[in-house]
Structures are given as C-alpha cells and as structure tokens.
Image: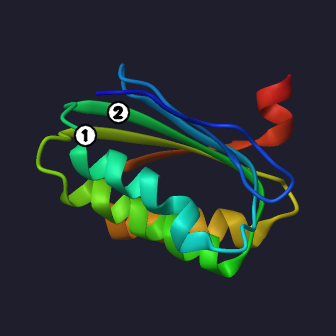
Amino acid sequence: MRPLIIEESGYTPKVQFLPEGQLSISGKSLPEDTAKFYEPLLEWINECNLEKITITVRLDYMNSSSAHQISKFLMCAKNNSNIKNCTIEWYHEASDEDSLDFGKELEYLTDFEFKFFLYAEAEA
C-alpha cells in the first residue's frame, strides 16, 4: 500500500493514510467539489489489503456533502473483504451533538468498533 497524504487547506481536511493501517482525516471539510476531493480516499480504501486499520476522524466542521462522503468511505471499508478489523476513533466537541449522533449512526450502519472522544479529553 502506498501512503496517501493530502495537506489541509482552508476548505479541505488533512488526510494521512499510512501503509501500516493508521488513517486520519482532520480539520475542516467543505471542499467546493466534495466528490472529487474524496475520490482518492475511496480508491485507497477500496484497494486496501490490510486486515486491521484504525481510522481517526477529527473534523471540526463538515458540510452535508462531506458527511455523505465520509459515510460512503466507511461503507467502502465495510465492504472491503480484506479488512477484518476496523476501529474508528471519532472526535467531537462536547456541544456538538450532531457530530456525536452522526458518529453513532455510522457505528450502527457499519458495525465497526467506534471509540468516541471529546476534543478536550484528547488535549489533556
């Protein structure tokens, strides 16, 4: 597996997918063309031949089209028969119940192990 690194911009998150199975998406996600931005992430997860991965989602803000792409990405991970063990580390603000609810919905849909963290806990 090749690494996939995309630097953060004012409108797109930082992406760091490492061949060891550590995948992270962080920052803000509101790209102008969401499908185009997330296309390499979907390709990477569809081609992934690792049995165990950990995906860290630490988005301060995502628009609805980004939420759709995150859902699509996790469903691709679920449908990849090579991936046997996937843990999701989902970060959210204490006051952001929408993000927590979205994470719980994805947990239900994917049946992956989700670990929920508050931003403040991660910084302590």
Q: Nearer the viewer, residue 37 or 83?
A: 37
Residue 103 quadrant: bottom right
Element marked by disc 1:
loop
Vertical side of 111 occupied by 57: above or below? above
Q: Is residue 107 visible?
A: no
Q: Quadrant of residue 6?
A: top right
Q: Secondary structure at mark 2?
A: strand
Residue identifier under label 1: 48
Q: Choose between 53 and 10: the one closer to the eye.
A: 10
Q: Residues within 10 Å of mark 2 (few under 14, many from 20)?
A: many
List x then y, in percent, for residue 51: 19, 31
Q: Is residue 24 above or below residue 112?
A: above
What amino acid type should be assigned to the residue bearing mark 2?
Answer: Ile
Left or right, 111 with respect to 57, comes to left
Residue at mark 2: 53
Indicate whether 72 appears above or below 27. Answer: below
Q: Give the mark count.
A: 2
Whether 60 is drawn above or below 72: the answer is above
Task: Please say whether residue 109 is visible from this viewpoint.
Answer: yes
Q: Nearer the viewer, residue 123 or 34?
A: 34
Q: Amino acid at mark 1?
A: Cys
Disc 2 and disc 1 in contact, CB within 8 angstroms: yes
Q: Position of residue 45 (x, y in %)?
A: 32, 48
Mark 2 and mark 1: Cα distance apart in space: 9 Å
Q: Quadrant of the C terminus?
A: top right
